Image: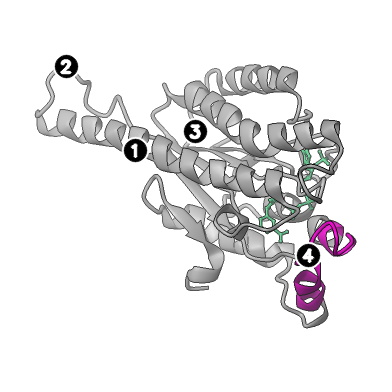
Amino acid sequence: MRNLIWISGASSGIGAALAVSTPYADARVIDLSRRGGVVEHFAADLADPADWVRVEEHFAAELAGFDGERVIFVHNAGTVVPIGPAAKVDAEAYAKAVLLNSAAPQVLGRAFLRATAGLECERQLVLLSSGAATKAYPGWSAYNAGKAAVEHWVRSVGLEEAALDQESADAVTGAAPGVAAGGVRGCRVIAVAPGVVDTAMQAEIRAVDEQDFPAVERFRELKRSGGLITPEQAAAGLWAVIEAKYPTGSILDLRDLPS
Ligand SMILES: NC(=O)c1ccc[n+]([C@@H]2O[C@H](COP(=O)([O-])OP(=O)(O)OC[C@H]3O[C@@H](n4cnc5c(N)ncnc54)[C@H](OP(=O)(O)O)[C@@H]3O)[C@@H](O)[C@H]2O)c1
C-alpha cells in the first residue's frame, strides 16, 4: 500500500465524506473514532487521555516497515457540545470538550510527528479548524478556545517543521555539514476551516435555546436559505488543499480559496 491515511472522526459528517473520497488509488484509510462504520476502524475515545497513548502505539505499530509514498493524518474529530455559558454547562461534558477540542489535536499531532519522523516519504498533518477560532460566540467557549488552540499550535509547529526543511535543503547544498542529505524533512502541518457544513454538528447547534446560544437564529437561517455546503463538498475542498501542498504552518479557510 502506497498511502496510509488516518482520519479522526470518520464515523460521521466531514470525516466520513473524507474517508470515502481519498484521491489516491492505493490507500489504506483508518478511522479513529468511538463508533466507526465507514472504513477500517481503530476504536478510540479521543477525549480520554488513556486513548491518546493507545493511538500513539497504534501509529508506531502500523508504520513499522512502511515504505510507501505518503502518510497523512487528518485530525477532524471535534465537538461543539456542551453549548451554553461556561458558568452554566455541565462540568464533566465541559471537561471532555476541552480535552477533545484543545488537548487532543496537540497531543495526537505530536504523536503523529514523532511516529513519522524517521520516514523519507511525504508526511502531512491536517487539523480541522473553524471560523470560531477567531470569532468569539457566547455559548461556545470550549469550542472557540479549542479551534484557536489548533491554529496557534499549527503556526508554532509549522515553524519547527519548516526549520527541518531548511536543514535538509542546506545539507543538499553542503551548507550544513553533518546533516545527512535528504535524511531530514519536515512534515507539512496545516489547519483548515471547512465553512458551514450540513452535518450532525450543525443540527446540534440549531437545536439549542437562544439563551444558551444567542447566535442560534443565524445558523437556523443559513440552513433554511441553503447556505450550508455538503460534507462531500467540504471533503473535496479539503483533499484539494492537501494535494495543493500549501506551505507548512498555513491557516486556511475553504471559503477564501478558489473552488
Ligand atoms: N459542520 C460544520 O459546519 C463545521 C464548521 C467548521 C468546522 N467544523 C469541524 O469539522 C470537524 C468535523 O465536524 P462535523 O461537522 O463533521 O461533525 P460531526 O458530524 O458531529 O462528526 C464529529 C466526528 O467527531 C467524532 N468525535 C466526537 N467526539 C469524539 C471523541 N470523544 N472521540 C473520538 N471521536 C469523536 C465523531 O465520532 P464518534 O462519535 O464515533 O466518536 C464524529 O465522527 C470538527 O472538528 C468541527 O469542529 C465543522
Q: Nearer the viewer, residue 184 or 212?
A: 212
Q: Secondary structure at mark 4?
A: loop
What x and y, as percent, mark residue 7? 66, 41
Taking the magenta stretch, the answer to whether it contains residue 183 is no
Residue 103: image quadrant is: top right
Mark 1–mark 4 CB contact (< 8 Å):
no
Magenta stretch: give its range.
204-223
Mark 1 residue crowding within 10 angstroms, few (<14) / some (14–19) / many (20+): some
Q: CA distance from mark 1 to mark 2?
A: 22 Å
Mark 2 residue crowding within 10 angstroms, few (<14) / some (14–19) / many (20+): few
Three-letter amino acid code at the position of disc 4:
Pro
Is residue 41 visible to the viewer in this orientation of the structure? no
- Residue 68 is marked as 3
Residue highlighted by disc 1: 159
Three-letter amino acid code at the position of disc 2:
Gly
Color theme of the render: one colour
Residue highlighted by disc 4: 214
What x and y, as percent, mark residue 148? 55, 47
Three-letter amino acid code at the position of disc 3:
Gly
Number of the front mark, 1 or 2: 1
Nearer-N-terminus badge (2/4): 2
Number of the front mark, 3 or 2: 2
Which residue is rendered at x = 31% and y = 38% of the image?
162
Mark 3–mark 4 CB contact (< 8 Å):
no
Is residue 156 visible to the viewer in this orientation of the structure? yes
Q: CA distance from mark 3 to mark 2?
A: 27 Å
What x and y, as percent, mark residue 236? 61, 63
Residue 160: image quadrant is: top left
Q: CA distance from mark 1 to mark 4?
A: 37 Å
